[in-house]
Image (cartoon, rainbow, N blue to C red):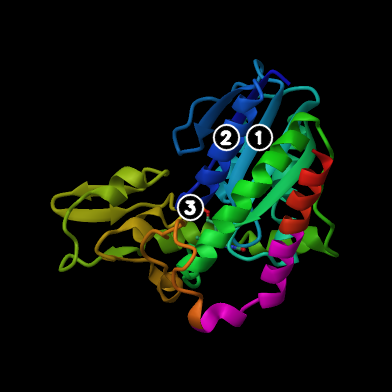
Amino acid sequence: MKKIKIYFFSGTGNTKKAANLFKNEFEAKGVVTKITEIKKDVCDFDTEDCDAVGIFYPVHAFNAPYVVLDFARKLQKTHDKPLFIVKTSGEPVRLNNISSLKLISVLKKRGYDFFAEYHYVMPYNMIFRHGDKTAFRMWDTMKKLVPVDASEVLEKTPRKPRKIPFGGVIAFLFRIEHPAMRVNGRFFKVDYEKCVGCGKCVRNCPMNNIVYENGKFRFNGDCACCVACSFNCPENAISIALLNGWKVNGPYNFDNPCGEDDGSHSRYCKKAYDRYFREAEIKTALQKLDN
Ligand SMILES: Cc1cc2nc3c(=O)[nH]c(=O)nc-3n(C[C@H](O)[C@H](O)[C@H](O)COP(=O)(O)O)c2cc1C
């Protein structure tokens, strides 16, 4: 492969980190890599001039966010162009295996040849806050895995997630999230007592969904619930309507191996997290042996 196009959607930066790691790996191996953020007004749907396409997204309710599906529906038609998918999610449960089913079916119809999917567990931006110690471990694990996985992509090694019984039906049911989040997004609220007017929420929204007018913030109907606004608000001034009880605010410190641990959440899905880290260690160790 000589040229790869990476498209990524990311609310709070985890998936963007994955996209940048892949880009650096490809470029280190002499592959020209163009990286484009999927946003409401993204205009680059042209994939003619590349040898493979990578689509990167965060798992939302066991699916790709609706903005990623909308983007895929507009991607240029092609014939058997190799496609790989990379996703990040907050938990390593196997149910996340179903999240790309719809995306793959859309892209197959447009002529893309899906051959591999990679899944990295990164700290939650919703539900609860992982401790910085776990965030460090997740980030460290992704950094070790990506060189191995990027080499596989360049060799077009097939890697598909294990199937889940009734996966298509389950994913379909969870896609209620798509219209629900657009409605929920209209009810986001700013606490004007806390707001310092930095405008980060307006600037960072990938959907251009937040408007500041006449001294008030208005949340329109295109919310993808990526939580870029509420997660990055320096004053924790944005409430996310029905999901406010699951809100996570403030960036993670990915560089502190001795940071806080997960506190009362440390037992949640512990087996699945342990399995994820163990499998990652084995994969990277085997790669070292091969070299
Ligand atoms: C609305 C919403 C739904 C989510 N659903 C899931 C899910 O079904 N499974 C999961 O493991 N993580 C889920 N997450 C967590 C994110 O996938 C995870 O934190 C991801 O790494 C965020 O990536 P980003 O920083 O690129 O936006 C969800 C997050 C949000 C905001």
Which residue is drawn at the image coordinates 53% and 37% (left, top)? Answer: 20
Question: In this picture, which residue range is highlighted in magenta?
Answer: 264-279
Give x and y (percent) for residue 217: 24, 55
Is any part of residue 216 visible from this angle?
yes
Of the numbered discs 3 and 2, the one sitting upstream in the chain is 2
Disc nearest the viewer among 1 and 3: 1
On the image, which quarter does residue 269 sit in? bottom right
Q: Main secondary structure of the magenta part?
A: helix
271, 124: nearer the viewer: 271
262, 178: nearer the viewer: 262
Asked if the residue at tag 3 contacts the one at tag 1, i.e. Cβ–Cβ closer than 8 Å, the answer is: no
Q: Amino acid at mark 2?
A: Tyr
Give x and y (percent) for residue 281: 72, 57
53, 72: nearer the viewer: 53
Q: Is residue 22 above or below residue 49?
A: below
Q: Which mark is residue 153?
A: none
Does residue 105 appear to the left or right of 20 in the view shown?
right
Q: Which mark is residue 54?
A: 1
Q: Residue furthest bottom?
A: 264
Which residue is drawn at the image coordinates 54% and 47% (left, top)? Answer: 15
Which residue is drawn at the image coordinates 48% and 52% (left, top)? Answer: 224
- Marks 3 and 2, how far apart in space? 17 Å
Q: Which mark is residue 224?
A: 3
Q: Say which element carries label 3.
A: loop
Residue picked out by circle 2: 7
On the image, which quarter does residue 234 sit in? bottom left
